[in-house]
Image: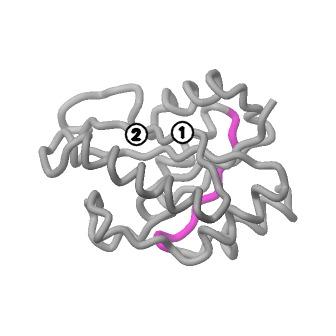
Amino acid sequence: MRKVVFFDRDGVINDNANYYVYRWDDFYINRGVIEGMRLLKNNGYDFVIISNQSGISKHIYSINDVELLHRLLDQLFKSQGLTVLEYYYCTHHPDETNCLCRKPMPLLFEKAIARFKIDPYQSWMIGDQPRDIEAAEQCRIRGILIPSNADIVTHAVNRILYDKA
């Protein structure tokens, strides 16, 4: 079974100073992301990104915008020797529906666990909102809540690799 680090996207992978980030020109990788992912990869971890993207249901941007951004992000990661197993995202806004895929609900984690044969007991979630951690913990995945746009090495990767708390 795989051990995986799940990442929230906006606020963890990229700077979310502008709340709805959907254009590559506005997408800035946070400090420590590439370094942190390399450290994790070298210790046998795979990666999945799980994100709420309610801007789609609010018609601020489209699914195609999100898919293009994820393809470009994937190219960046691959150029650094990194691979993301999958990018899962919820398109719903909580004012419109109570879906099962929007964090804090765990459906997207459950899909990833089943599809990629992930061991939740060896896996982690790095998120910048309590809902990220709540969704992961419902699947028995340990969560680490970090400040938005923080260096993930300092705030999460070292804990995963060395504390094992």
* Quarter the N terminus occupies: top right
Residue at disc 1, secondary structure: strand
Counting from the top left corner in percent of width and height, residue 36 is at 69, 67
The answer to whether residue 161 is above or below residue 85 is below
Q: Residue at x 84, y 56 (%)?
A: 43
Which circle, 1 or 2, is nearer the viewer? 1
Q: Position of residue 148 (x, y in %)?
A: 47, 69
Label 2 near label 1: C-beta < 8 Å?
A: no
Q: Amino acid at mark 1?
A: Glu
Q: Which residue carries the number 1 mark?
A: 86
Tell me which amino acid carries mark 2.
Answer: Tyr
Which quadrant: the C terminus? bottom right
In the image, residue 141 lies in the stretch drawn in magenta = yes
The spot of residue 89 in percent (x, y) is: 40, 39
Residue at 51%, 48% (x, y): give it.
132
Decide: is 28 above or below 40: below
Q: Where residue 103 sits: x, y (%)?
A: 43, 40
Left or right: 80 in relation to 105: right
Residue at image x 57%, y 66%? 146
Q: Nearer the viewer, residue 129 or 28?
A: 28
Q: Is residue 143 magenta?
A: yes
Is most of the magenta stretch helix, strand or loop? loop
Range shown magenta = 140-149
Helix, strand or loop under label 2: strand
Looking at the image, is 155 positioned above or below residue 78?
below
Q: Residue at x 46, y 57 (%)?
A: 73
Q: Residues within 10 Å of mark 1 (few under 14, many from 20)?
A: some
User: In the image, 142: left or right of 59?
Assistant: right
Find disc 2 in the rendering and name its residue. Answer: 89
Asked whether 133 or 81 is in front, the reply is: 81
Residue at the left extreme? Answer: 59
